[in-house]
Image (cartoon, rainbow, N blue to C red):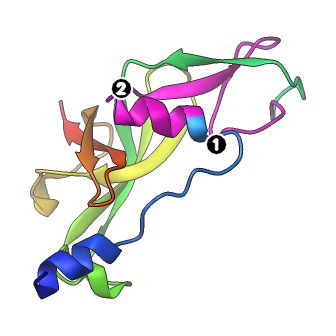
Amino acid sequence: MDKKERYSATFPYPIPEYGAESYWDACNEQRLMMQRCEQCVRFRWHPSPRCGDCGCERYSWELLSGRGRINTWTVVTHPVHPAAVEKVPYIVVVIELEEQVGLTMVSNLIDCDVNCVDFNQPVEVDFVTHPIGQKIPVFRLA
């Protein structure tokens, strides 16, 4: 294994926490899913045992469109982990998903020049595979 492969394999990856297993399983099928409260019908991100809006414990997992708009972003130019050395510069975005006002998630914007990012640009989800095999949601300009 060369240096690049070693760093890539050690790059941080998600470890499914309690209640998030369904989310990561869906990612592996290239589907973006979130919990939706059965009482107030609001989506909630991050997965949790209770709705942050109404406190209800009942929810379902629902498929999202994967479309949204860039709320804000930053360009990372200094690696914060040895495995990120060959990845800089990269773009971290906060995406507001189209399903609900204020429903945001943090991800990466890929295949985009760092000088071409702007507020409110439409994006679509895509998935990249970490060397351990887990698929991770990222976004591309729509």
Residue situated furthest front in the rendering: 1
Residue that badge 2 annotates: 66
Question: What's the residue at 81%, 30% (across, down)?
Answer: 51
Identity, as a three-letter code, of the amino acid under mark 2: Gly
Dividing the picture into quarters, in which one does residue 125 lie? top left
Q: Residues within 10 Å of mark 1 (few under 14, many from 20)?
A: some
Question: What's the residue at 67%, 38% (across, down)?
Answer: 47
The picture places residue 16, in percent across and down from the top left corner, at 58, 50
Tell me the quarter of the image containing the C terminus: top left
The picture places residue 116, in percent across and down from the top left corner, at 12, 53
**One can see residue 78 in this view:** no
Asked which secondary structure carries label 2, the reply is loop
Report the number of discs.
2
Q: Which is more toward the observer, 140 or 6?
A: 6
- Look at the image and give the residue range highlighted in magenta: 22-51
What label sits on residue 46 in the rendered view? Answer: 1
